[in-house]
Amino acid sequence: MTQLLMVGLGGFLGAVSRFLLAALVQGAAGDRVPYGTLAVNVVGCAVIGAVTALAETRGGLSDGLRLFLVVGLLGGFTTFSAFGNETLALLRAGEVGPAAANVLANVLLAIGAVWVGRLVAQTVVSG
């Protein structure tokens, strides 16, 4: 139960932070390009980079802190940070092909899934 609370509290704070930062950036930038989402993804990736580097150099994170920060807070803020972290881990391990495949698969499949989801919803609504 404690694990769920750590993830849930972090997720709540991450989601609220995502909403506030995206709205702030998008309000300043205008509506044409989704700069709010870009800002959230870049900030989330910078934070997960800092957290993982500190964990590596300072002896790791406790399970509770990892659940709160990485799974909850950053997961609620943006899952793009996990994607960036996992891709960088592949590159650091010399796995350039799998890293490139990960980037292509995530981008193409995610956009394709949005398209399929829209088609399904439109078919259900009009059908």
Image: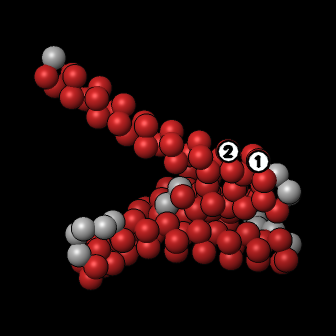
Instruction: Give the SS element for disc 2.
Output: helix
Residue at the spot of label 1 = 97
Q: Residue at position x 44%, y 73% from top?
A: 39
The quarter of the picture where the C terminus appears is: top left
Q: Is residue 126 above or below residue 84?
A: above
Q: Is residue 84 left or right of residue 13?
A: right
Q: Residue furthest bottom?
A: 28
Q: Is residue 25 above or below residue 99?
A: below
Q: Residue furthest left?
A: 126
Mark linked to residue 23: none
Q: How many marks?
A: 2
- Residue 7 on image: x %, y %: 55, 56
Q: Residue at position x 64%, y 69% from top?
A: 48
- Look at label 2 and name its amino acid: Ala
- Look at label 1 and name its amino acid: Gly
Q: Quadrant of residue 29?
A: bottom left
Q: Residue at position x 34%, y 33% from top?
A: 117
Q: Is residue 84 left or right of residue 43?
A: right
Residue at the spot of label 2 = 101
- Residue 96 on image: x %, y %: 78, 53
Q: Residue at position x 22%, y 22% from top?
A: 123
Q: CA distance from mark 2 to mark 1?
A: 6 Å
Q: Is residue 41 above or below residue 58?
A: above
Q: Confirm or deny contact between disc 2 and disc 1 (CB under 8 A).
A: yes
Label 2: few (<14), some or many (≥20) within 10 Å?
Answer: few
Q: Quadrant of residue 61?
A: bottom right
Instruction: Give the SS element for disc 1.
Output: helix
